[in-house]
Amino acid sequence: MKPYGTVLVLIITATQLGCNIFETRDPEAPSQSSSNYIPPTEPSLVFSNMINAFRDMNSVNYLKSFADSSTSGRSFGFEPTPQAKLKYGGVFLNWTKQSEQQYFENVRSKIPSGSSASLAFDALTVQSLQSDSAQYEATYRLTVQHSVASIPREAQGRAQFFLLADRSRNWVIWRWIDVPTGTSAFTWSDLKGEFGQ
């Protein structure tokens, strides 16, 4: 047998003994949940991203909704309802973007597998809109199927959001005021107070 024939026989034998290179394989499971993040090139997309971040429980995308002094020239600030400020004391003294991350991840850690979260903004209205700044007001309902029996699973209320366009022309929230609604409803401030500790 010629040397080429021997090599050909060896290659054929090796492929017969090894894996079938023409057989399809099962796809690998994704290493991270899918992302529904939309570049917020207009202010209203920030709210869509917040809704998606809660549905996916994706803290990275959630945090992209908030100002960072390194990219926008302003730091993020949150003003809770007066009732929550009284109830949770020092939790809100220096609330930052990192505080948002901590509370969000604390909430996520208490959601059992198979449970979910949902956020809805009702009556989202533009109060002011400029080329680089905007103000929105909305009523919200945030439902989180967490496992802490002593904490309500639904937060509802009203909020004012102040947005700006950062250096990349993406819109972010730089100031958020949770507005009391006159009821004793459990608000987003209360949820942050409970899980921000």
Image: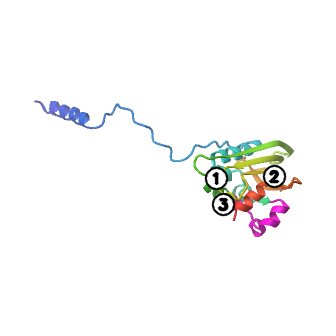
Q: What stretch is highlighted in magenta?
A: 80-100
92 within the magenta span: yes
Per the rendering, the mark at residue 174 is none
Q: Can residue 139 be seen in this view?
A: yes
Horizontal relation, residue 26 to residue 68: left or right: left
Q: Name the residue under label 3.
A: 102
Tell me where residue 23 appears, x and y as whole percent: 35, 32
In which image quadrant can residue 11 be found? Answer: top left
* Residue 68 occupies quadrant: bottom right
Few, some or many residues within 10 Å of mark 2 (<14, 14–19, 20+)? many
Does residue 73 appear in this view? no
Task: Find disc 2 in the rendering and name its residue.
Answer: 162
Seen at 66% across and 60% down, the residue is 102
Assign the N terminus to one quadrant of the image: top left
Q: Give the residue displayed 67% in from the left and 42% down from the top.
A: 38
Which badge, 1 or 3, is on the more N-terminal residue?
Answer: 1
**Amino acid type for the residue under numbered disc 3:** Gln
Majority SS type along the magenta span: helix
For label 1, the residue is 59
Q: What element carries label 2?
A: strand
Crowd around label 1: few <14 · some 14–19 · many ≥20 (10 Å): some
Residue 17, compared with residue 168, is above or below; it is above
Q: Is residue 51 above or below residue 190?
A: above
